[in-house]
Image: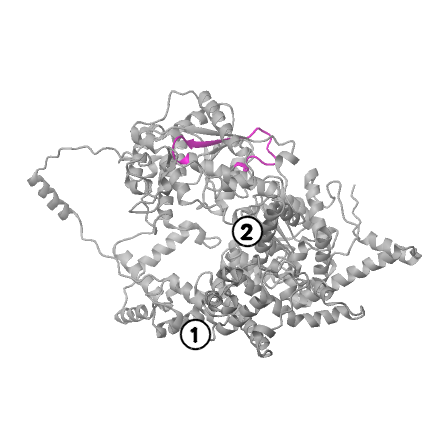
Amino acid sequence: MSSDTTPQVATPRDETEEERIERYFTLPDAKKHKDDTNSIKRLKYLLSLTDLFRHFINKRMEGDPKFRKLVNELDRASKAQKKTRGRGGRGRRKTEKEEDEELLNDNTQMATVYTESPPFINGTLREYQVQGLNWLISLHENSISGILADEMGLGKTLQTISFLGYLRYKCGINGPHIVIVPKSTLDNWRREFEKWTPEVKTVVLRGDKTERAEIIANEVLTADFDVVISSFEIVIREKSALKKVAWEYIIVDEAHRIKNEDSMLSQIIRLFHSTNRLLITGTPLQNNLHELWALLNFLLPDIFSEAETFDQWFEEKEAEGEEGENDEDSVVKQLHKVLRPFLLRRVKNDVEKSLLPKKELNLYIGMSDMQVQWYQKLLEKDIDAVNGQLGKREGKTRLLNIVMQLRKCCNHPYLFEGAEPGPPYTTDEHLVFNCGKMVMLDKLLKRLKSQGSRVLIFSQMSRMLDILEDYCSFRDYEYSRIDGSTAHEDRIAAIDEYNAEGSEKFVFLLTTRAGGLGINLTSADIVILYDSDWNPQADLQAMDRAHRIGQTKQVYVFRFVTENAVEEKVLERAAQKLRLDQLVIQQGRTQQKAAANNSESKGDLLSMIRHGTEDIFKSSKGTLKTEDDIEAILLHGEKRTKQLNDKFAELGIDDLQKFSTDSAMVWNGEDFQHRVGANGIGAPDPNGKGWINPPKRERREQHYGVNSYYKDIFLLQQQQPRTMRPPKQVPLAEHQFFPPGLKALQDQELAFYRKQINYKVPYADIDVDALEEGETKESKRAALNKEIADAEPLTEEQEALKRDYESEGFTNWTKRDMNNLVHLIGRHGRDNMEAVARAFRGKGEEEVLRYAKTFMERHTEVEGYEKYIAVIEQGEEKLKRQRQQQELIKTKLKECKVPMNELPIVYPANNSKRVYSEEEDRFILMMVNKYGLEHPKLFEKIRKEIKKSPHFRFDWFFLSRSTSELSRRCTTLMLTLSREVEGPRTIKRKSLGKGKLDDDKRRRESGTMTPDTEDRGTPMSVE
């Protein structure tokens, strides 16, 4: 039964087409009253949960008068309600009318709760899914947006569709809603809507430009839909049309895609107007406070408006905890309180008892002789980097490349050009015995085939799937394949064919990233991770293709790890990240320092590379034990897996933040990694144990036949045909702003060159992601080849025009130069380009002015131009604020004859912790007035003036202040002066009808912060 008491509302389906269009496309200004009502309801609900939200609300009130008025109204209503209750508590009884109104109000506000699957769903929900539906309904009733973060495979799609069904059938809200999903799950969402709520009219927005325009014109703009389902890429392309709709709900699947607020997708969907928003994700959400803020800002921009406020508040709370109780969990608990209203996270083991927990096993595998030889070659090639002889400019990028090459060797040596024997190239047993992992895979698949299992094999490398395809053909295993280049239709067909009843497909080959999202492959019960992803969540996504609702068998996950090689360290690092993520979400914890991020340092990468290298160099023989029985390998893997899990199971969040993998460069108690060498940073001692020596050189005697040598040279020169050189073309970097016509001329020139050399576009060169909807790789290739066949050479006029165009571009401007220009424009303002030109180093002023003018005219041609314009606008806003503050100081000083003695500073009431004297504060303000807030070295100047001033000759405290401390104090003083100006009006409004209040009480009611609290804030940046 359901205790649903929501009144049966006449659904909007009764409205006319004109009324429906008007409702769907009502502009945000016309919905002002509704938005204000929702805001009041939302604020009231959040403040009733915890006063922690008051801090963020107060910060927003400082800079938003409209929001301040809204909160003040809410506070007045709350105080009046408390006052009424207080009078009633002194003995006055309620009248019949008052009691009737209260009962009616309680009845209309009663929460909707379902105890079983609702009747408007064409099927049956599980108990925990009903609970999830109730949670979504409670969010809606309190005008709160939220994050549905159930573990992958628990039916988040169904819970979301059920909630939209509730809005339709119980609240009379049938749209408009938009569901933004990965491209691979478009059809799955459409099918789920048709299955569970067939009356909901869905529109899948996809296709090429023409098809999308037709869908928008005939269905979207005519309001002939309830739900629009579209992919991330299409939403970005069609933002102008989608911005016109007044959405009821914006729902984002795989919401971790918007953790970066500067990404194109995140910025665009923030432009859409909606009543509420819902994020769906199966992965933990935050790796640091800033990513968490980005998600909360998207959900509740009126409360979590500034990242600086969010970060600063938690840093202050952490500092208070350290100074007081020394309780490292105090901040964590408060963050959990902030998260609790918005986040629902359940895991399979807790809610889905019918689904057996998956069993994971790491199989540690040796290398073949060929793998050891290639591993040695790769290390010898970069032996200086392996030994820590890294320059300051190279370093991490070079180490990442070495790690990637070593991981390729662990996967299969045939991934390197020249490793596979041939030509002729054959598919034979050498494909297996030249790689340790393939030997293990061969043994394992034979066993799994005999017991009737079906297998998913994941690898990060699509070229590794090519080798696995050859292997499956060689062993006569039926298989399917999906990677990043698989067309959407082919992907759906492959999944349906594999899941079909009675399917003969034994193996499904998938890349970890392309095959890990939105795919249901519960017909398989074995998952093999051929290699591990840097991000453990990607591997979890892959495992959950088989381990999800609907799986009736026991799921086994086998992870292949090359023993005593780089892969062991990669796995260890992934296990550390996974443990940290589990603490973050499932225990409501978060990393307390953004510096503890997920990127690998140089030391970590070097440790990974050097792991096992000494054994590799000792012998060129392989470490693979082919005689080992499969049972012995599985037993060894089980033991090693338990050791790895136990290693991290007992570690808490602070231990994990400080944890680093055991370095291979620590020997005899000394860390050679941090010993600085003459030729680089972190160089180990060549004479010590930390140094890895390459194998000894072998002398080989060579016999040269001079006559045959020159004969071969002459024959080679005669056989080689003279090849045409490709045309010399200028790279068209978007930030160099070449004339638009240059690209067309270059394309024509290149096409004619390809025609002369009989070039044909290879099938593999077709980028699937660039294809329009309905376009295939074959049709795209045919069109490109036709362009080459029809190409004509450039005329003399076109050649001259091409040279002119090339000279007009800013060829000596780099992307870094453009970034510098953007920051300088933000610093000085668009109305002061002369100052920008003077401040720009390395270029002439005329050239800078010309580039700046071109940039402002054509900035939309640069990818991600929105973030550059945002930098400029933020800088101009900061400049405006600084000028206002400068004028305020100037006005205050003019009122005094002797500012050092007379300048009045009205401090807040709760001012007991203030450590600066009034004389010191006056001096700071006088120096700010003297040099100006815009001075690039303002606080260094103030520090020098303090040391020169005779007033403070014996003031040790003031003399010892650093520039950052002076900056923080200046920020506090500017805030105090600003509130002093705004304060009287606020106090006057509050004191009407209340009688005269003393100064301290007035300041307390105006919400003024203490300078001591402010001094812990972010220092004022003076650029």
In the rendering, at what x and y percent does residue 177 appear?
Answer: 64, 55
Report the span colored magenta: 543-567
Judged from this view, the residue extending furthest toward the front is: 954
Please tell me whether mark 2 sits on a helix, a strand or a loop. helix
Q: Amino acid at mark 1?
A: Met
Splitting the image into 4 quarters, where does residue 979 fall? bottom right
In the rendering, at what x and y percent does residue 550 appear?
Answer: 61, 35
Splitting the image into 4 quarters, where does residue 735 fall? bottom left
CA separation in Å, label 2 and label 1: 35 Å
Disc 1: CA contacts within 10 A as few (<14), some (14-19) or many (>=20): some
Q: Is residue 129 left or right of residue 696?
A: right
Residue at which label 1 appears: 833
Q: Amino acid at mark 2?
A: Glu
* Picture residue at 57% right of the left edge, 44% below the top: 284
Q: Nearer the viewer, residue 638 or 919?
A: 919
Q: Is residue 401 left or right of residue 870?
A: left
Please tell me whether mark 1 sits on a helix, a strand or a loop. helix
Q: Quadrant of the N terminus?
A: top right
Residue at which label 2 appears: 291
Q: Which mark is residue 462?
A: none
* Picture residue at 68% right of the left edge, 65% below the top: 68
Disc 2: CA contacts within 10 A as few (<14), some (14-19) or many (>=20): some
Q: Nearer the viewer, residue 333 or 41?
A: 333
Q: Is residue 592 visible?
A: yes
Splitting the image into 4 quarters, where does residue 435 fall? top left
